[in-house]
Image (cartoon, rainbow, N blue to C red):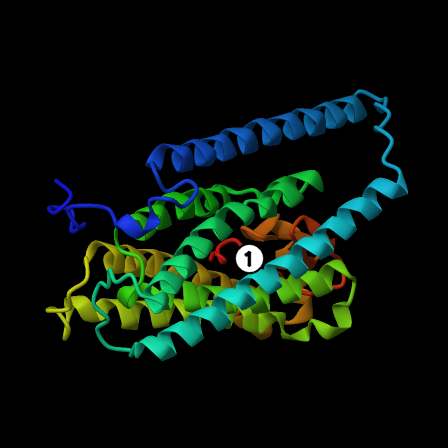
Amino acid sequence: MLEELGLPATPDPRVEGYPLMGSFWPTAGITLAYVVGVWLWREHLNRKRNLSRKSTTNGYTVPKAAQPAQRYDLVKILMILYNIAMVIYSGFLVIETLIMISRAGYTLGCVPLDRGTGELSIRLVNIGYLFYFSKFIEMLDTVFFLWRGKLDQVTFLHVFHHAAMPPSIWWGVKYAPGGIVFMFPLANSFVHVIMYTYYGLAAMGAYRFLWWKKYLTVLQMVQFVIFLLHQSQVFTYNRDCDYPKVFPAAICFYAAVFLVLFGNFYVKAYWKRERLSKADWDAAAKKTSSVTTNGHVSNGVLKHHQNGVVNSAAATSHSKDSKKAV
């Protein structure tokens, strides 16, 4: 059965002692808890919002719960620390991967499945596991969105992305860590270094240094193109590559879907906007409540969200989750 799916007949014995790797069910359980928890939290916030709107239309206003400045400061501090931690975490994965693939002699061509027990092989397995574990940490992105009440950010695409990654990567680490798919954690972690740097600066209020946010979308699209070109070789000119093809196929599918989504966002948020006069853009903004999964129009201006915080100074929005997907 496993061989029909392109998986090795047996799991990689080197990951037997790793937390969550003994069985698929803990990963599935955490993912399910994430999805259910997000749904319940979102429904709770929706009910509160609807109650507030209903009370306003009836001529009276329900007093809002007290939100002292200390709470806001706590959220802001936690977000800054979270983004800094993710920059460090992702940066470590990038540096460690580069060192290991250089020592192991990896190339951009076929890198067969390696089940060696040497130091380099084990460290490459560790990289794969840490990359897998980071996808659980990234679920905190959703927590910050909901904590700040940014329901429009918690879209189906956002939740699907965060819910799909841990189970998908679990299979790769369990059966075929290392090999040609090294490009996935390397490129994705590099993008996350840049991305979480941006979000950290935004949480600090350093908006004047964020003129380059437009290029985050471009960087994401370049990442997906790299995945497609690199992983598709096992189906084209490197068909004899000794690596389970189900994993490069999954990466190619993921990259193709998100390349389309990011391309669509880029055209709407940047390319078309640059060709609209200010008057036309304002008119279009008033008729549109949402342009992308991670941005919304308010008073004719596209506002930007970072982990649940609104950047009112931003003129356009960047979609992290159709990222980051990333």
Name the residue rendered at 60%, 58% in the picture.
86
| Image quadrant assignment for residue 275 | bottom right
Mark yes or no: residue 118 visible.
yes
| Image quadrant assignment for residue 227 | bottom left
| Image quadrant assignment for residue 240 | bottom left
Above or below for 149 versus 272: above
Name the residue rendered at 78%, 52% in the picture.
77
Q: Position of residue 318 (x, y in %)?
A: 58, 61
Number of disc labels: 1
Above or below for 61 versus 326: above
Q: Which residue is mark 1?
A: 320
Name the residue rendered at 50%, 72% in the picture.
95
Q: Amino acid at mark 1?
A: Lys
Mark 1 surroundings within 10 Å by alpha-carbon count, few (fewer than 14), some (14 through 19), many (20 or more)? many
Above or below for 241 versus 162: below
Position of residue 159 in the picture relative to residue 4 (left or right):
right
Position of residue 159 in the picture relative to residue 304 (left or right):
left
Above or below for 109 versus 287: below
Name the residue rendered at 73%, 49% in the picture.
78
Pick the residue in front: 270 or 153. 153
Q: Position of residue 110 (x, y in %)?
A: 21, 73
Mark yes or no: residue 316 visible.
no
Q: For the residue labelled by badge 1, is the local secondary structure a helix, a strand or a loop?
A: loop
Pick the residue in front: 143 or 87. 87
Pick the residue in front: 173 or 34. 173
Q: Position of residue 311 (x, y in %)?
A: 73, 58
